[in-house]
Every structure is written in C-alpha cells, then in structure tokens.
Image (tube, rainbow, N blue to C red):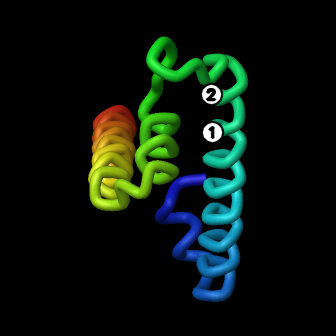
C-alpha cells in the first residue's frame, strides 16, 4: 500500500498503520540479529558483521564506538530506503 493511500484514509488509520509498521520493523530487526549471530557462528575475529561488531563494542563498554557504528548502520538503512523510494517514484511516474 503506497504511503499516500495510508495517509488519505484518515489520521486514525495512519497512526494505526505507523504503529504496526514500527512493531514489525523492530521484530524483524531482532530476528535478523539472531539469524546473523547463529549463521555466522559468532566466532570472534573470524566472522564479524556490523551488528555483531556493535554488540562486541557494547559488551566491552566502548559505548561511543558502539553508538557510532550503530548510527552508521542506521544511516545506511535510511539511504537504502531513500534509494528504494526514488526508484519506486520513477517507476510509477
């Protein structure tokens, strides 16, 4: 469902859809972290992904570095969403 349809249905439905999307996003993120941890084997120094690196930094009390890495990961996710939106906009135009 395009964003324009969601927000044309009224404020109540827009809020309900937004909350549903937020919950689904958080659930997927938690599931992806678990999947990455299991599939990679979480072998220190041999298999490392960005989420596992952030966890290692956080567990070693390097909060600034963990926050910086998490911010970078968030920025990459947002850039990906912008690129996806631009591509969808160009296709429907």
Q: Looking at the picture, does residue 21 appear above or below residue 92?
A: below
User: To which residue does mark 2 refer?
Assistant: 36
Q: Position of residue 55 (x, y in %)?
A: 51, 45
Quarter of the rendering containing residue 80 = top left
As helix, strand or loop, the secondary structure at mark 2 comes to helix
Residue at the extreme top of the image, as rendered? 46
Q: Is residue 59 above or below residue 53?
A: below
Q: Which residue is mark 1?
A: 33
Give the x, y percent position of residue 45.
Answer: 45, 18
User: Label 2, label 1: how many angstroms apart (C-alpha)?
Assistant: 5 Å
Label 1 element class:
helix
Horizontally, residue 37 falls left or right of residue 69, namely right
Foreground pick, 70 / 29: 70
Q: Whole-percent x and y of residue 48?
A: 47, 23
- Residue occupying the point 36% across, 32% down: 91
x 66%, y 70%: residue? 17
């Amino acid at each position: 469902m395009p964003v324009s349809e969601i927000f044309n249905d009224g404020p109540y439905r827009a809020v309900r859809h937004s909350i549903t999307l937020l919950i689904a996003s958080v659930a997927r993120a938690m599931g992806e972290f678990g999947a990455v941890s299991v599939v990679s084997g979480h072998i220190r120094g041999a298999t490392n992904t960005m989420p596992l690196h952030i966890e290692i930094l956080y567990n070693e009390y390097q909060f600034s570095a963990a926050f910086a890495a998490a911010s970078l990961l968030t920025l990459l996710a947002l850039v990906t969403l912008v690129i996806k939106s631009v591509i969808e906009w160009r296709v429907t135009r």
